[in-house]
Image (cartoon, rainbow, N blue to C red):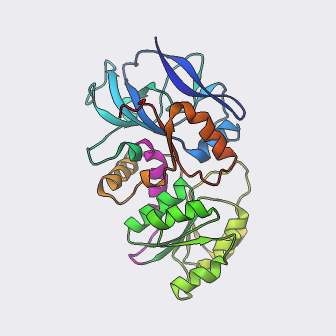
Amino acid sequence: MKKTEAIVFTGVNQVEVREVSVPDPAPDEVQVRTLFSTISGGTEGWILQNLFTWKPTDYPCIPGYQRVGIIEAVGADVQGWQVGDRVMATRSNWSGEVNPHAGSHAMLGNTPATELYALTEAVDNIDASGAVVAQVGYNAANRAVIEPGDWAVVYGDGLIGQSAAQAMRARGGRVIQVGHRAERLKIAAAHSADVVINNHDENVLDVVHQHTGGKPVTVVLDSVQSETAQAEYVPLLQKGVGQIVYCGFTSGTTWADMGDLQRRELTTHFISGWTRPRMESTLQHFADGKMSLKALITHLVPYQQGPDMYHSHLNKSASFLGATLDWTGGAA
């Protein structure tokens, strides 16, 4: 057994850096030494609070489902990968004193070979380290039926919302991003959207119609998922034609007025998880410069500061958008 440092959720709202044991990779796994891992603030925040209803948190656990690193060992049955390959890896597996809750925020971890993604030189390490979150945005943007030049409204100014905006623009859509954090909207204006709206200070319907000439928008990509948000954006959509893509998570059971959606005959899409085709397309978007997760990272910090990053997220720090943990000690 090897020893490695990792981010560990020890209890509700309790997080620390701890040394844990790592076994050799199983026959179908590879062992990856992490260069960078990116925090998925929304999902991991819910997990830290034991509010992620899809899978209760089993403390103590290591969170995280996205990292970039170098293969150090290859399981006996693994083909197509070799020591020294730079890869994007999703979840890690093991059994021991600390449970994996996807388990990617660790310096060293074993990942099933089926959860590895090859990287070209054109894909930046920071982009690759957050590819799963970016893929959620890619998935959201590609569910809608649009034509080039169509207007789309993205609700939410976090990593998923801004990744969705970038992916929608890559399809030729014109994007209006709605949020309420001035610092995040400034980043969105620079990297993700054609228009930004602070819905704490501006009337969304009025501003959107100024840009669309009073016409309805084609689609709303909703990473907020609340009845308040729905009441604000549904009037932007044309009855019988408009589309909504829900691309976030909420811990409750009632966050949308389904009756209103039915009365307006709006098409709705729900997304979750990741697939290999979507992940590979997202990585290609990084390589082609169509999307950039790196542009959204406000905090690139040594992994030892990981606990501070979670607290900044939970405390809704004004300057916090994306956080990437550096496991290299400055070597890469």
Give the residue drawn at x 70%, y 71%. 231
* Residue stretch rendered in magenta on the structure: 129-149
Q: Is residue 31 left or right of residue 225?
A: left
Residue 196 in which image quadrant: bottom right
What quarter of the picture does the C terminus occupy? top left
Q: Relative to 169, is 86 above or below?
A: above
Give the residue drawn at x 32%, y 47%. 123
Give the residue drawn at x 38%, y 75%. 148
Give x and y (percent) for residue 183: 58, 60
Residue 305 belongs to the span the image colors magenta: no
State how many labels appear: 0
Q: Relative to 62, is 286 above or below?
A: below
Q: Do we see residue 59 in this rendering? A: yes
In the image, farthest residue toward the bottom: 213
Residue sitting nearer the eye, 284 or 315: 315
Q: Is residue 279 left or right of residue 8?
A: left
Residue 143 belongs to the span the image colors magenta: yes
Give x and y (percent) for residue 263: 68, 75
Q: Do we see residue 262 in this rendering? A: no
Residue sitting nearer the eye, 211 or 230: 211
Magenta stretch: dominant secondary structure: helix
In the image, farthest residue toward the top: 1
Give x and y (percent) for residue 17: 58, 26
Give x and y (percent) for residue 157: 57, 60
Q: Relative to 114, is 60 above or below?
A: above
